[in-house]
Amino acid sequence: MKEIVCESERLEINTPLMKTRGRPKGRSSDNRSFGPLGDIIRKHRLQRGLGLAEVAKACQCSVQFISNIEHGRAPLPWDKIPALAGFLKVPLDELQAANLAVRSDFQSFTKGSKSRAVIAASAFTMASRDKELQEVIQAYQLADPTSRKKFVKTAIKLLSES
């Protein structure tokens, strides 16, 4: 029951309770996996009781874009990773490895297998702690798609010669 007070009289109005939309922020019973990147972001977001809007604001993306990343429909832009890692308190290299694993250009490098891409991305990220490899990764991230394809072809050639 809601009470409205007017100057001349007091009115009582019966109003039904307003129903809130969606689930409470930071809670979900959906445990499906949509890939390593989405799983990491979702896990850490839910552990901290955060909603999609808060994560989106932290990395200056739209809510829909964060949802797409969590559901494996989009990779995270490289320049957004440090802000997101800091906000969710996720190790930067873990987020980079997961992001690398979901990128279609990297999956083609690992011959299309998603599980192979995840393993390769993890190994690649661990190896990236080496300063020289960090420079190579940075150059790859900044390269245009044509240069990335050349990089992949050269890398495959070098790896097959080993």
Image: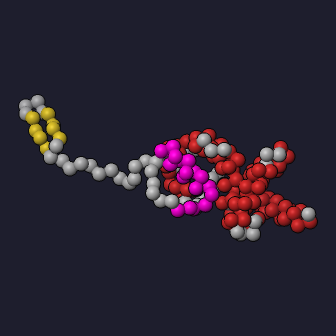
- In the displayed orientation, state which residue is furthest to the right: 161
Residue 156: name its quadrant.
bottom right
- State the count of labels: 0
Could you tell me which residue is drawn at 38 percent across and 54 percent down? 22
Q: Nearer the viewer, residue 148 or 125?
A: 125
Residue closest to the eye, 28 or 100: 28
Residue 28 in sight in this render: yes
Q: Nearer the viewer, residue 89 or 68?
A: 89
Q: Please tell me whether residue 29 is drawn above or below residue 89 in the rendered image.
A: below
Residue 18 shown in magenta:
no
Q: Residue at x 40, y 53 (%)?
A: 23
Farthest residue, direction top: 7
Q: Is residue 53 visible?
A: no
Q: Is residue 159 above or below residue 25?
A: below
Q: Position of residue 6 (x, y in %)?
A: 12, 33
Return the x and y of residue 99 as percentages of the image width and height. Answer: 66, 54
Quadrant of the rendering where the C terminus is positioned: bottom right
- Point out residue 74 in the picture as x, y percentages from the top left corner: 60, 59
* Quadrant housing residue 100: bottom right
Q: Residue at x 75, y 60 (%)?
A: 120
Left/right of residue 64 with respect to residue 22 in the rendered view: right
Quadrant position of the N terminus in the picture = top left
Please identify the dominant SS of the magenta region.
Answer: helix
Q: Position of residue 57 (x, y in %)?
A: 52, 43
Left or right, residue 68 beside residue 26: right
- Residue 39 is a magenta residue: yes
Q: Which residues are magenta?
A: 32-49
